[in-house]
Image (spheres, coloured by chain):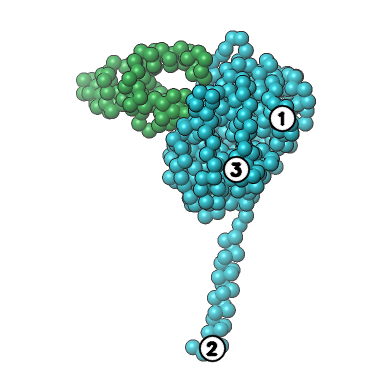
């Protein structure tokens, strides 16, 4: 069990630096779905490489200066006055945390 | 070798060459290009036998990519998110020319005479106009408002008279750029509404219509009378008083028009709106599966096909334009992003991004004709767009 955990941790290390892999109860399959959602659907507005589009750029470099909590709240509740919709009816808080961690670590295609 | 033999041999080889060449000659009227958004590639397809012919790589970030065609239907101009403008020779399946013209772009248009290609940019906000043969810069038009703040540009289309029309998302303006003299002459229409998010031109090239995200209603410019300014129509069109979240911006480009009606995607609501084309009054609201993204009419206008925003994007519905009701529902696969009709509408090609395929349907009996494997396919563009205003 421990070995498996370590392996999973190693597997996802580049994606979620800063958080321990086993702090998520999200299945591997769901993580793959979230990764696809992030790149493809968030990417429709923010760019697949997160360099921005109609929505602002969300590269690791740009996020460095922004509080993590603000990004989490923006994803969950949307940002009134902009096209950013709230995702709290579609994603769980933990899934949003996974997405934010992935963004801060830098999204890999 | 005596001279006679030599002459005969020469004549023979020339005729052989000619025969070879003639077997390779083909037209491009049944060709098209499908964007593979994740890999920065496209596939060139043909619609006579519904097959994929080849792939072209090296096109950069193709999230939200679009294409216009040269009027000879040989070259496809691909506008990529990373500011790339690529001219593809679809007959030879190779890149003829590629430039990075900005940091971040959203779409493009080709001029009435086919000699200019314009690109709309988010960063730095504005449009750039290029020579369509060489991709050399002809004009740079920054979208700057009074405070010298640059605005993202959306809804760029061509208009008759060698003009381009586009909207400024941040500034809330519509600009008309006239390039008939060679140098751009700009007319600016201010305060047209908050956050225009996309625009379209009617197929006759007369009305430019911008959708507004920040408020209800749409902004219309009559290009037969640009001196009359921008007017507002469809005051109830939009998100309404209770602002619903919009998970994907509806696209206006494919706005379906039939003889009497225009069919529009409602913003943030699960409905397709039917409006009278003469007076822009709403005739009906048709309840549909999810938030509509593309609402597209079959070329004969008898059917309107609709796809939907995340998370209900595995479905396509077909509306009968006489009965004004849904007559068919299809499940082409996860993440249906785009639909394109063959020039006379016997087939429609539907891309399903997460299913990794494009399915070709018979529009008469709705049966799948074939399905082609593609890598995260998004936009599908057939060459008959070359001769349509605004596409």
| Badge 1 element | helix
Residue B106 appears in view: no
Q: Chain of mark 1?
A: B
Q: Nearer the viewer, residue B331 or B158?
A: B158
What separation in Å lies between label 3 and label 1 (alpha carbons)? Answer: 20 Å
| Colour of chain A in the image | green
Residue at the (64%, 39%) spot, across then down: B178
Residue placed under numbered mark 3 in the picture: B183
Using the rendered view, name the quadrant where residue B232 is placed: top right
Q: Is residue B99 left or right of residue B344?
A: left
Q: Quadrant of the C terminus of chain A?
A: top left
Q: Earlier in the sequence, mark 2 or mark 1?
A: 2
Residue B122 appears in view: yes
| Badge 3 element | loop
What separation in Å lies between label 2 and label 1 (alpha carbons)? Answer: 75 Å
Chain shown cyan: that is B
Q: Is residue B82 left or right of residue A1?
A: right
Tag 2 near tag 3, CB within 8 Å: no
Tag 2 near tag 1, CB within 8 Å: no
Q: At which x and y percent is residue B331?
A: 57, 29
> Vertically, is B181 above or below B221?
below
Q: Is residue B3 left or right of residue A36?
A: right
Residue at the (47%, 32%) spot, across then down: B124
Q: Nearer the viewer, residue B234 or B225?
A: B225
Residue placed under numbered mark 2 in the picture: B3
Q: Chain of mark 3?
A: B
Using the rendered view, name the quadrant where residue B272 is placed: top right
What separation in Å lies between label 2 and label 3 (alpha carbons)? Answer: 60 Å
Residue at the (55%, 48%) spot, across then down: B131
Q: Residue furthest left?
A: A3
Residue placed under numbered mark 1 in the picture: B227
Tag nearer the camera, 2 or 3: 3
């Amino acid at each position: 069990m421990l070995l498996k955990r370590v392996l999973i941790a190693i597997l996802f290390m580049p994606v979620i630096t800063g958080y321990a892999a086993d702090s998520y109860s999200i299945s591997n399959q769901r993580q793959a779905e979230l990764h696809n959602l992030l790149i493809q659907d968030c990417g429709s507005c923010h760019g697949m490489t997160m360099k921005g589009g109609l929505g602002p750029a969300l590269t690791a470099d740009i996020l460095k200066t922004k509080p993590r909590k603000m990004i989490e709240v923006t994803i969950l509740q949307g940002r009134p006055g902009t096209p950013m919709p709230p995702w709290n009816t579609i994603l769980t808080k933990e899934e949003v945390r996974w997405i934010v961690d992935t963004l801060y670590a830098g999204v890999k295609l | 070798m005596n001279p006679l033999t030599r002459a005969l041999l020469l004549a023979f080889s020339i005729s052989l060459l000619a025969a070879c060449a003639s077997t390779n000659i083909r037209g491009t009227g049944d060709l098209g290009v499908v964007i593979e958004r994740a890999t920065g590639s496209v596939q060139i397809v043909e619609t006579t036998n519904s097959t994929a012919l080849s792939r072209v790589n090296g096109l950069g970030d193709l999230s939200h990519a679009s294409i216009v065609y040269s009027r000879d239907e040989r070259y496809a101009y691909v506008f990529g998110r990373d500011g790339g403008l690529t001219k593809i020779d679809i007959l030879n399946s190779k890149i003829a020319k590629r430039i990075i013209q900005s940091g971040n772009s959203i779409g493009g248009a080709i001029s009435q005479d086919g000699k200019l290609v314009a690109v709309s940019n988010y960063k730095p906000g504005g449009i750039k106009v290029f020579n369509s043969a060489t991709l050399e810069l002809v004009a740079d038009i920054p979208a700057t408002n009074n405070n010298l703040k640059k605005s993202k540009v959306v809804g760029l289309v061509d208009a008759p008279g060698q003009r381009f029309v586009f909207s400024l998302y941040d500034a809330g303006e519509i600009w008309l750029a006239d390039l008939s003299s060679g140098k751009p002459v700009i007319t600016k229409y201010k305060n047209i509404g908050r956050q225009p998010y996309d625009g379209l031109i009617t197929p006759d090239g007369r009305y430019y219509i911008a959708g507004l995200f920040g408020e209800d209603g749409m902004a219309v410019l009559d290009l037969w009378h640009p001196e009359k300014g921008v007017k507002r129509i469809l005051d109830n069109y939009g998100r309404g008083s209770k602002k619903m979240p919009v998970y994907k911006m509806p696209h206006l480009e494919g706005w379906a028009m039939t003889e009497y009606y225009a069919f529009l995607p409602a913003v943030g609501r699960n409905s397709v709106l039917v409006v009278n084309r003469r007076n822009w009054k709403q005739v009906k609201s048709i309840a549909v599966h999810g938030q509509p993204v593309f609402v597209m009419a079959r070329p004969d206008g008898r059917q309107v096909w609709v796809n939907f925003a995340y998370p209900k994007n595995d479905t396509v519905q077909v509306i009968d334009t006489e009965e004004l009701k849904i007559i068919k529902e299809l499940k082409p696969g996860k993440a249906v992003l785009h639909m394109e009709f063959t020039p006379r509408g016997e087939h429609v090609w539907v891309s399903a991004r997460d299913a990794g395929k494009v399915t070709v349907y018979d529009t008469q009996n709705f049966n799948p004709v074939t399905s082609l494997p593609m890598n995260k396919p998004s936009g599908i563009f057939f060459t008959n767009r070359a001769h349509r205003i605004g596409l």
